[in-house]
Amino acid sequence: MSTLAKAISDVPMVADISPMRRFYWSVRRELWENRYLYIAPLAVAALIVVGYGLGLVHLPDKLRAAAALDAMQQQERIEQPYTFAALLLMFTTLLVPMFYCLDALYGERRDRSVLFWKSLPVSDLTTVLAKASIPFVAIPLLTWVITVVTHFVMLLLAGVRLLGTGLSVSSHVSFGQMEWILFYHLVVGHGFWYAPFWGWLLLVSAWSRRAPYLWATLPLLAVGLVEKIAFNTSYFGGWLAYRFMGGPKDMPQGSNPMTMAHLALTPAQSLASPSFWFGLALAAAFLAAAVRLRRYQGPI
């Protein structure tokens, strides 16, 4: 009896679990239950590496042809495969959070698992914030790590292919600057600049009883249509386009996609931009509404 009593006394009480630890395990649960969050970018990265490896047969000829260009054009030509790989992974990062956000709160009401999760000592606020952290932080960081590893493997394969030829790719690829720009683009752009979109999708997921994909788009189209008919303006549609494109209207045409985030806003400019903070405030309002809906909405 004394051994059993000691074992029971060693088990921490529910009240002893800190809010941060509950949040941590809630995030872990999201990653466990939605394995496509990392399987999708990993699959895309594998396809990129395979495709790049097959194309290495012609790499020496491409480098010799690029030698006739000036230094800037030569670097852009050699960095094209790395830029394409980053863009493809960023596009994946854009699609995956959309599917995740729309199913995050709707799915648990549809399969009635929300009854079980609400029985646990985890608040609705913690649950919604944990789900919001996936598109805000987890997916951008995960995609950045996968992209960096992909670029490194591509450089390694190119180096092996060029052994004995006297040619080099690494001397023409600004690896550190490229990965920093990519980090800034993913974390600030896809994570926080798109925050109103992620907040809106989570709100729709918490509210809709069916067809969340339809309800996520219809209100936006309705607002734009009413504005156009009533006032013959398109400010709302322009704001959505500006927010989605993630850069100023005077961005140079034909800019290298890997440097677009750097040309658009520096970190200091982002923090000083009213649009940046307005987007975060709008996302916070959407998340607060999603918390309230989850508290009172039952299973479908």
Image (spheres, rainbow, N blue to C red):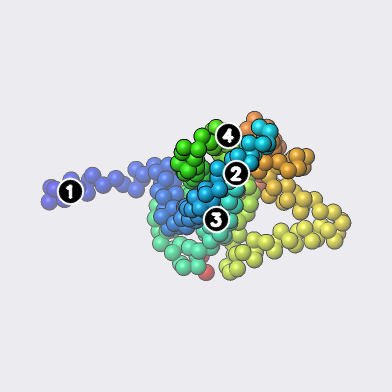
Indicate which disc, 4 or 2, sits on the residue closer to the N terminus: 2
Badge number at residue 298: none
Q: CA distance from mark 4 to mark 1?
A: 68 Å
Q: Mark number for residue 62?
A: 2
Query: Mark 4 or 3, which is nearer the eye?
Result: 4
The Cα–Cα distance between marks 3 and 2, rounded to whole angstroms, is 34 Å
Residue 169 coordinates in the image, percent (x, y): 54, 37
Q: Three-letter amino acid code at disc 3?
A: Val
Answer whether residue 137 is visible to the viewer in this image: no
Q: Earlier in the sequence, mark 4 or mark 1?
A: 1
User: On the image, numbered disc 4 is attached to which residue?
Assistant: 172
Marks 2/1: CA–CA distance: 74 Å
Q: Is the residue 54 above or below the residue 179 in the image?
A: below
The residue indicated by pointer 3 is 96
Q: Residue at x 85, y 61 (%)?
A: 229
Residue at 17% from the left image edge and 48% from the top image edge = 5
Disc 1 versus disc 3: nearer the observer: 3
Q: Disc 4 and disc 2: Cα gap in Å?
A: 13 Å
- Where residue 150 appears, as percent x and y from the top left, is 49, 45
Query: Horizontally, is 216 left or right of 114 in the view?
Result: right
Question: Of the residues under marks 1 and 3, which one precedes in the sequence?
Answer: 1
Residue type for callout 4 = His
Which circle, 3 or 2, is nearer the viewer?
A: 2
For the residues labelled 4 and 2, say whether their Cβ atoms are less than 8 Å apart.
no
Label 1 Cα neighbours within 10 Å, binned few <14 / some 14-19 / many ≥20: few
Q: Which residue is mark 1?
A: 5
